[in-house]
Image: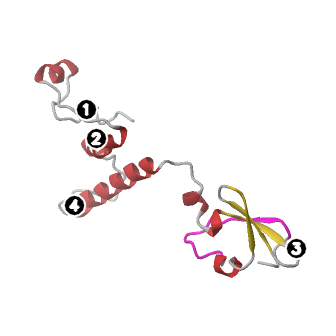
Amino acid sequence: MELLKDGCIVGNMGHSVHEIDVQSLKDLKWEAIRKHVHQIFWPNGHKIFLLAEGRLLNHTCSCIPSLVVSVTHATQVLGIIELYTAPKGMYKNEVYLLPKKMDEYVASLHLATFGARLTELSDSQAEYLGIPKHGPFKPHYYKY
């Protein structure tokens, strides 16, 4: 690292947290410049700026709320379970939209985060809206 240009910015855009040898920098002087930015000084005055303490930038410095990550991962897991448990030959090697029912199920799991709860439609509400009482509540082609 001491061979890097003085004052260079070092960030990890790799695939894991092992691309930058942060451990070798631990005995040097660290100064927090701002959130996720440290300036690291060598005894001879050489310095670098290290982003996110060497961790993956897209995970560490992302402004994506953890709720969005949770919804995304829950949806992916349910999609994988569907593919794994589906009868052989049901899915071809193509791109499929997830059923709205699955999207709505994942959303319902996260409602408590907002202090919300899902109520059931009455028969008259479902009839008026022209949708099944238990969902899906949007047509398949509808994009959220």
Identify the element where label 4 is drawn.
loop
Which labelled disc corresponds to residue 137? Answer: 1
**Residue wearing tag 4:** 89
**Disc 2 and disc 1 in contact, CB within 8 angstroms:** yes
Q: Residues within 10 Å of mark 4 (few under 14, many from 20)?
A: few
Q: Earlier in the sequence, mark 4 or mark 1?
A: 4
Give the magenta range.
6-20
Residue 18 in the magenta stretch? The answer is yes
Give the residue type that dot 2 points to: Glu
Q: Residues within 10 Å of mark 1 (few under 14, many from 20)?
A: some
Q: Earlier in the sequence, mark 2 or mark 3?
A: 3
Identify the element where label 3 is drawn.
loop
Distance, label 4 to label 2, CA atoms, is 26 Å
**Disc 4 and disc 2 in contact, CB within 8 angstroms:** no
Distance, label 1 to label 3, CA atoms, is 63 Å
Give the residue type that dot 3 points to: Gly
Identify the element where label 1 is drawn.
loop
Q: Nearer the viewer, mark 1 or mark 3?
A: 3
Give the residue type that dot 1 points to: Phe
**Residue wearing tag 2:** 104
Give the residue type that dot 4 points to: Gly
- Compared to residue 43, the image places residue 82 above or below, namely above
Question: What residue is shown at x 86% (from left), y 69% (from top)?
Answer: 6
Q: Earlier in the sequence, mark 1 or mark 3?
A: 3
Residue 81: x and y, percent?
26, 60
**Disc 4 and disc 1 in contact, CB within 8 angstroms:** no
Q: Nearer the viewer, residue 1 or 113?
A: 113
Question: What residue is shown at x 38% (from left), y 49% (from top)?
Answer: 71
Distance, label 2 to label 1, CA atoms, is 8 Å
Quarter of the image where one finds residue 83: bottom left
**Residue wearing tag 3:** 45
Quarter of the image where one finds residue 73: bottom left
